[in-house]
Image (cartoon, helix red, strand yellow):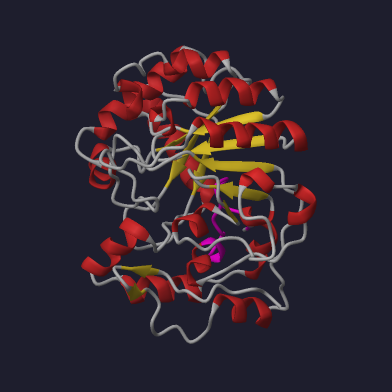
Amino acid sequence: MTTTATVQIRRNGKPALPNSPVSFGEKLNASSLDLRSATINTLQVNVGKLCNQACKHCHVDASPTRTEIMSRETIEACLDALRKHKIPTIDITGGAPELVPDFRYFVVEARKTGAKVIVRHNLTVMFEENQTDLPEFFRENKVEVMSSLPYFLEQQTDAQRGTGVFNKSVEALRKLNAVGYGIDEKLVLNLVYNPTGAFLPPEQSAIEADFKRELKTRYDILFDNLYTITNMPIARFLDYLRSSKNEERYLQKLVNAFNPATVEGLMCRNIISVDWTGKLFDCDFNQMLEIGVSADLPQTIHDFSPEKFARRQIMTGAHCFGCTAGSGSSCGGAVAN
Protein backbone atom coordinates (compact mmCIF):
# COMPACT_ATOMS: atom_id res chain seq x y z
CA MET A 1 0.00 0.00 0.00
CA THR A 2 1.36 3.41 -0.94
CA THR A 3 2.07 5.89 1.83
CA THR A 4 0.14 9.08 1.17
CA ALA A 5 1.02 12.35 2.85
CA THR A 6 -1.81 13.60 5.04
CA VAL A 7 -1.38 17.17 3.81
CA GLN A 8 -2.76 18.41 0.52
CA ILE A 9 -1.15 21.00 -1.69
CA ARG A 10 -1.58 24.25 0.20
CA ARG A 11 -0.91 27.90 -0.45
CA ASN A 12 -1.93 30.59 2.01
CA GLY A 13 -3.66 27.92 4.07
CA LYS A 14 -6.02 26.72 1.32
CA PRO A 15 -6.14 23.11 0.07
CA ALA A 16 -5.33 22.92 -3.62
CA LEU A 17 -7.52 19.98 -4.62
CA PRO A 18 -10.67 20.38 -2.51
CA ASN A 19 -13.03 18.46 -4.78
CA SER A 20 -10.81 15.61 -5.95
CA PRO A 21 -12.79 12.35 -5.91
CA VAL A 22 -9.62 10.26 -5.48
CA SER A 23 -6.26 10.58 -3.74
CA PHE A 24 -2.97 9.83 -5.48
CA GLY A 25 -2.51 6.75 -3.32
CA GLU A 26 -5.96 5.48 -4.27
CA LYS A 27 -5.18 6.03 -7.94
CA LEU A 28 -2.01 3.94 -7.60
CA ASN A 29 -3.84 1.19 -5.75
CA ALA A 30 -6.55 1.06 -8.42
CA SER A 31 -3.78 0.31 -10.94
CA SER A 32 -2.17 -2.27 -8.59
CA LEU A 33 0.91 -0.04 -8.25
CA ASP A 34 3.11 0.42 -5.22
CA LEU A 35 5.43 3.42 -5.38
CA ARG A 36 8.76 2.45 -3.83
CA SER A 37 12.31 3.60 -4.40
CA ALA A 38 14.73 1.61 -6.53
CA THR A 39 18.50 2.19 -6.70
CA ILE A 40 19.52 5.69 -5.63
CA ASN A 41 21.68 6.98 -8.46
CA THR A 42 21.25 10.74 -7.92
CA LEU A 43 21.79 13.04 -4.97
CA GLN A 44 19.70 16.10 -5.75
CA VAL A 45 20.75 19.07 -3.65
CA ASN A 46 18.77 22.28 -3.42
CA VAL A 47 21.36 24.73 -2.12
CA GLY A 48 18.92 27.53 -1.41
CA LYS A 49 16.16 29.87 -2.52
CA LEU A 50 18.23 32.92 -3.43
CA CYS A 51 17.83 33.70 -7.14
CA ASN A 52 18.35 36.64 -9.47
CA GLN A 53 14.90 35.96 -10.98
CA ALA A 54 11.37 35.48 -9.66
CA CYS A 55 9.71 33.31 -12.32
CA LYS A 56 5.92 32.94 -12.33
CA HIS A 57 6.07 29.12 -12.47
CA CYS A 58 8.74 28.68 -9.75
CA HIS A 59 7.84 25.88 -7.35
CA VAL A 60 10.68 26.95 -5.04
CA ASP A 61 9.35 30.50 -4.53
CA ALA A 62 12.91 31.64 -5.24
CA SER A 63 13.72 35.33 -5.69
CA PRO A 64 16.41 37.97 -5.09
CA THR A 65 14.94 38.64 -1.63
CA ARG A 66 15.31 35.10 -0.27
CA THR A 67 18.11 34.49 2.21
CA GLU A 68 18.07 30.70 2.57
CA ILE A 69 21.43 29.29 1.42
CA MET A 70 23.29 26.09 2.23
CA SER A 71 26.16 26.29 4.71
CA ARG A 72 29.65 24.88 4.11
CA GLU A 73 28.97 22.32 6.84
CA THR A 74 25.94 20.94 5.00
CA ILE A 75 27.82 20.99 1.69
CA GLU A 76 30.56 18.92 3.33
CA ALA A 77 27.93 16.42 4.53
CA CYS A 78 26.66 16.08 0.96
CA LEU A 79 30.22 15.56 -0.30
CA ASP A 80 30.81 12.94 2.40
CA ALA A 81 27.72 11.06 1.19
CA LEU A 82 29.00 11.17 -2.40
CA ARG A 83 32.43 9.87 -1.39
CA LYS A 84 31.23 7.21 1.01
CA HIS A 85 28.39 5.76 -1.05
CA LYS A 86 29.77 6.33 -4.57
CA ILE A 87 26.54 7.97 -5.77
CA PRO A 88 27.11 8.39 -9.52
CA THR A 89 25.32 11.73 -10.06
CA ILE A 90 24.82 14.94 -8.11
CA ASP A 91 22.14 17.36 -9.33
CA ILE A 92 22.66 20.86 -7.90
CA THR A 93 19.68 23.18 -7.99
CA GLY A 94 18.22 26.26 -6.30
CA GLY A 95 17.27 29.17 -6.60
CA ALA A 96 20.23 30.09 -8.64
CA PRO A 97 22.83 27.73 -7.13
CA GLU A 98 25.71 29.85 -8.48
CA LEU A 99 24.81 32.61 -6.00
CA VAL A 100 25.62 30.42 -3.00
CA PRO A 101 29.10 31.43 -1.77
CA ASP A 102 30.44 27.86 -1.70
CA PHE A 103 28.90 26.79 -5.02
CA ARG A 104 32.18 26.52 -6.94
CA TYR A 105 33.86 24.67 -4.10
CA PHE A 106 30.92 22.25 -4.08
CA VAL A 107 31.21 21.58 -7.83
CA VAL A 108 34.99 21.11 -7.80
CA GLU A 109 34.93 18.74 -4.82
CA ALA A 110 31.95 16.81 -6.21
CA ARG A 111 33.85 16.25 -9.47
CA LYS A 112 36.79 14.86 -7.48
CA THR A 113 34.51 12.06 -6.21
CA GLY A 114 34.03 10.90 -9.79
CA ALA A 115 30.34 11.84 -9.83
CA LYS A 116 28.68 13.46 -12.80
CA VAL A 117 27.71 16.99 -11.81
CA ILE A 118 24.48 18.52 -13.15
CA VAL A 119 23.82 22.20 -12.49
CA ARG A 120 20.38 23.71 -13.03
CA HIS A 121 21.51 27.03 -14.46
CA ASN A 122 18.99 29.77 -15.29
CA LEU A 123 21.28 31.40 -17.93
CA THR A 124 20.76 35.00 -16.79
CA VAL A 125 22.75 34.51 -13.59
CA MET A 126 25.76 34.50 -15.90
CA PHE A 127 25.45 38.30 -16.08
CA GLU A 128 25.50 38.85 -12.34
CA GLU A 129 28.60 40.19 -10.56
CA ASN A 130 31.52 37.73 -10.53
CA GLN A 131 29.62 35.20 -12.67
CA THR A 132 30.71 36.10 -16.20
CA ASP A 133 33.25 33.25 -16.32
CA LEU A 134 30.66 30.56 -15.60
CA PRO A 135 30.91 29.02 -19.11
CA GLU A 136 34.64 28.48 -18.62
CA PHE A 137 34.10 27.17 -15.08
CA PHE A 138 31.46 24.73 -16.28
CA ARG A 139 33.71 23.56 -19.12
CA GLU A 140 36.72 23.08 -16.84
CA ASN A 141 34.69 20.87 -14.51
CA LYS A 142 32.73 19.05 -17.26
CA VAL A 143 29.45 20.17 -15.68
CA GLU A 144 26.27 19.05 -17.41
CA VAL A 145 24.27 22.26 -17.78
CA MET A 146 20.46 22.13 -17.51
CA SER A 147 18.77 25.42 -18.37
CA SER A 148 15.13 26.47 -18.43
CA LEU A 149 13.89 28.22 -21.55
CA PRO A 150 10.10 28.56 -21.75
CA TYR A 151 10.06 29.13 -25.51
CA PHE A 152 12.16 30.11 -28.50
CA LEU A 153 10.32 33.44 -28.78
CA GLU A 154 10.75 36.53 -26.62
CA GLN A 155 7.13 37.22 -25.69
CA GLN A 156 6.38 33.81 -24.16
CA THR A 157 9.70 33.61 -22.33
CA ASP A 158 9.54 37.09 -20.81
CA ALA A 159 5.91 36.54 -19.80
CA GLN A 160 7.00 33.65 -17.58
CA ARG A 161 10.44 34.75 -16.45
CA GLY A 162 10.53 38.56 -16.60
CA THR A 163 11.24 41.36 -19.05
CA GLY A 164 14.57 41.05 -20.82
CA VAL A 165 15.17 37.43 -19.77
CA PHE A 166 14.87 36.03 -23.29
CA ASN A 167 17.55 38.25 -24.83
CA LYS A 168 19.91 37.53 -21.93
CA SER A 169 19.18 33.81 -22.26
CA VAL A 170 20.05 33.88 -25.97
CA GLU A 171 23.31 35.67 -25.22
CA ALA A 172 24.12 33.17 -22.46
CA LEU A 173 23.44 30.20 -24.75
CA ARG A 174 25.78 31.69 -27.33
CA LYS A 175 28.48 32.01 -24.68
CA LEU A 176 27.99 28.36 -23.71
CA ASN A 177 28.19 27.34 -27.38
CA ALA A 178 31.37 29.42 -27.72
CA VAL A 179 33.19 27.24 -25.15
CA GLY A 180 31.87 24.01 -26.68
CA TYR A 181 28.56 23.34 -24.93
CA GLY A 182 26.02 21.75 -27.25
CA ILE A 183 28.83 21.05 -29.73
CA ASP A 184 31.45 18.93 -27.93
CA GLU A 185 29.82 15.63 -26.91
CA LYS A 186 31.57 15.87 -23.52
CA LEU A 187 29.98 19.26 -22.78
CA VAL A 188 26.26 18.60 -22.45
CA LEU A 189 23.77 21.46 -22.67
CA ASN A 190 20.14 20.53 -22.06
CA LEU A 191 17.13 22.84 -22.10
CA VAL A 192 14.00 22.53 -20.00
CA TYR A 193 10.54 23.52 -21.25
CA ASN A 194 7.67 24.42 -18.92
CA PRO A 195 4.30 25.44 -20.38
CA THR A 196 3.52 29.13 -19.93
CA GLY A 197 -0.04 28.44 -18.79
CA ALA A 198 -2.40 25.95 -17.18
CA PHE A 199 -1.92 23.07 -19.60
CA LEU A 200 0.23 19.98 -20.04
CA PRO A 201 3.48 20.01 -22.04
CA PRO A 202 3.35 18.83 -25.66
CA GLU A 203 5.04 15.62 -26.79
CA GLN A 204 8.71 15.96 -25.86
CA SER A 205 10.42 14.85 -29.06
CA ALA A 206 8.18 17.07 -31.21
CA ILE A 207 8.84 20.25 -29.27
CA GLU A 208 12.54 19.41 -29.02
CA ALA A 209 12.63 19.32 -32.83
CA ASP A 210 10.88 22.71 -32.94
CA PHE A 211 13.35 24.24 -30.47
CA LYS A 212 16.38 22.86 -32.30
CA ARG A 213 15.17 24.14 -35.63
CA GLU A 214 14.11 27.59 -34.42
CA LEU A 215 17.07 28.29 -32.14
CA LYS A 216 19.49 27.28 -34.88
CA THR A 217 17.70 29.21 -37.62
CA ARG A 218 16.96 32.37 -35.64
CA TYR A 219 19.99 32.60 -33.32
CA ASP A 220 22.54 29.99 -34.48
CA ILE A 221 22.26 28.22 -31.11
CA LEU A 222 22.86 24.50 -30.57
CA PHE A 223 21.95 22.28 -27.62
CA ASP A 224 21.75 18.56 -26.87
CA ASN A 225 18.32 17.68 -25.47
CA LEU A 226 15.10 19.39 -24.50
CA TYR A 227 13.13 18.09 -21.52
CA THR A 228 9.47 18.85 -20.90
CA ILE A 229 8.40 19.35 -17.30
CA THR A 230 4.81 19.80 -16.10
CA ASN A 231 4.18 22.89 -14.00
CA MET A 232 3.51 21.67 -10.48
CA PRO A 233 0.50 23.16 -8.69
CA ILE A 234 2.51 24.45 -5.73
CA ALA A 235 4.03 27.74 -4.59
CA ARG A 236 4.05 30.54 -7.17
CA PHE A 237 2.35 28.55 -9.93
CA LEU A 238 -0.46 27.69 -7.54
CA ASP A 239 -0.89 31.42 -6.86
CA TYR A 240 -1.20 31.94 -10.62
CA LEU A 241 -3.79 29.16 -10.90
CA ARG A 242 -5.86 30.74 -8.16
CA SER A 243 -5.62 34.29 -9.44
CA SER A 244 -6.59 33.15 -12.95
CA LYS A 245 -9.38 30.91 -11.58
CA ASN A 246 -7.79 27.85 -13.18
CA GLU A 247 -6.97 25.88 -10.04
CA GLU A 248 -9.67 23.22 -10.00
CA ARG A 249 -9.70 22.85 -13.80
CA TYR A 250 -5.93 22.35 -13.97
CA LEU A 251 -5.78 19.95 -11.07
CA GLN A 252 -8.66 17.92 -12.43
CA LYS A 253 -6.84 17.84 -15.76
CA LEU A 254 -3.83 16.28 -14.01
CA VAL A 255 -6.00 13.67 -12.32
CA ASN A 256 -7.81 12.80 -15.55
CA ALA A 257 -4.49 12.46 -17.41
CA PHE A 258 -3.02 9.99 -14.88
CA ASN A 259 -0.88 7.49 -16.79
CA PRO A 260 0.11 4.35 -14.86
CA ALA A 261 2.95 3.73 -17.35
CA THR A 262 4.79 6.74 -15.91
CA VAL A 263 5.14 5.37 -12.38
CA GLU A 264 8.10 3.08 -13.04
CA GLY A 265 10.15 6.02 -14.37
CA LEU A 266 9.32 8.63 -11.72
CA MET A 267 12.38 10.48 -10.46
CA CYS A 268 11.52 9.81 -6.80
CA ARG A 269 12.39 6.15 -7.35
CA ASN A 270 16.06 6.93 -8.06
CA ILE A 271 16.94 10.09 -6.19
CA ILE A 272 17.18 11.43 -2.69
CA SER A 273 16.54 15.15 -2.31
CA VAL A 274 18.41 17.37 0.16
CA ASP A 275 17.25 20.85 1.18
CA TRP A 276 19.48 23.79 2.14
CA THR A 277 19.43 22.72 5.82
CA GLY A 278 20.40 19.10 5.03
CA LYS A 279 16.94 17.60 5.56
CA LEU A 280 15.99 14.66 3.31
CA PHE A 281 12.98 14.33 1.01
CA ASP A 282 11.74 11.88 -1.61
CA CYS A 283 11.80 14.61 -4.29
CA ASP A 284 12.27 18.33 -4.81
CA PHE A 285 8.51 18.91 -4.94
CA ASN A 286 7.93 17.17 -1.61
CA GLN A 287 10.75 19.32 -0.28
CA MET A 288 8.90 22.52 -1.19
CA LEU A 289 5.75 21.23 0.52
CA GLU A 290 7.78 20.11 3.57
CA ILE A 291 6.70 16.49 3.15
CA GLY A 292 9.73 14.72 4.58
CA VAL A 293 10.75 11.11 4.10
CA SER A 294 9.00 8.47 6.17
CA ALA A 295 9.47 9.05 9.91
CA ASP A 296 11.18 5.67 10.39
CA LEU A 297 14.09 6.74 8.13
CA PRO A 298 17.10 9.00 8.82
CA GLN A 299 15.95 12.58 8.37
CA THR A 300 19.15 14.38 7.35
CA ILE A 301 22.04 13.90 4.94
CA HIS A 302 24.36 13.50 7.93
CA ASP A 303 22.78 10.09 8.63
CA PHE A 304 22.04 8.97 5.07
CA SER A 305 22.80 5.47 3.84
CA PRO A 306 21.52 3.92 0.58
CA GLU A 307 20.73 0.65 2.32
CA LYS A 308 18.21 2.28 4.65
CA PHE A 309 16.51 4.07 1.78
CA ALA A 310 16.37 1.20 -0.71
CA ARG A 311 12.83 0.02 -1.43
CA ARG A 312 11.41 2.71 0.86
CA GLN A 313 7.80 3.79 0.50
CA ILE A 314 7.58 7.14 -1.26
CA MET A 315 5.59 9.85 0.47
CA THR A 316 2.94 11.16 -1.91
CA GLY A 317 0.26 13.82 -2.13
CA ALA A 318 -2.14 15.40 -4.61
CA HIS A 319 0.72 17.24 -6.33
CA CYS A 320 2.10 13.87 -7.53
CA PHE A 321 -0.57 13.86 -10.23
CA GLY A 322 1.65 16.44 -11.96
CA CYS A 323 4.40 13.85 -12.42
CA THR A 324 2.09 11.13 -13.74
CA ALA A 325 -0.07 13.12 -16.17
CA GLY A 326 0.24 12.33 -19.87
CA SER A 327 3.84 11.43 -20.72
CA GLY A 328 4.83 12.08 -17.13
CA SER A 329 7.30 14.57 -15.75
CA SER A 330 10.59 14.38 -13.93
CA CYS A 331 13.76 16.43 -13.58
CA GLY A 332 14.88 14.55 -16.69
CA GLY A 333 11.74 15.31 -18.65
CA ALA A 334 9.00 12.97 -19.89
CA VAL A 335 9.11 9.40 -18.59
CA ALA A 336 6.67 7.51 -20.83
CA ASN A 337 4.84 7.67 -24.15
Q: Is residue 125 left or right of residue 119?
A: left
Quarter in which the C terminus is drawn: bottom right
Placement of 190 over or under 321, stated as above or below: above
* Residue at the spot 26% in from the left edge and 34% down from the top edge: 165
Q: Which is more toward the observer, 116 or 62? A: 62
Magenta span: predominant SS is loop
Asked whether residue 333 is drawn in magenta, I would say: yes
Question: x%, y% of residue 90?
Answer: 62, 36
Q: Can residue 180 be seen from the camera position used here? A: yes
Q: Nearer the viewer, residue 128 or 99?
A: 99
Residue 218 appears in the rendering:
no
**Image height of 8 relative to 178, above or below:** below
The residue at the far left in this view is 163
Among the 4 quarters of the image, the one containing residue 234:
bottom left
Whether residue 276 is in magenta: the answer is no
Of residues 20 and 213, the one nearer the viewer is: 20
At a point 34% along the width and 16% down the height, the residue shown is 130
**Quadrant of the rendered image containing residue 246:** bottom left
Residue depicted at 39% across the width and 19% down the height:
174
Q: Position of residue 281 (x, y in %)?
A: 58, 55
In the foreground, 251 or 272: 272
Does 171 appear above or below 88? above
Residue drawn at (62%, 36%), measured in percent from left and top? Answer: 77
Q: Position of residue 181 (x, y in %)?
A: 51, 20
- The residue stretch that appears in magenta: 323-336
Report how many numbered discs are placed on residues in the image: 0
Quarter of the image that includes the N terminus: bottom right
Residue 193 pos. (x, y %): 43, 45
44 with respect to 313 (left or right): left
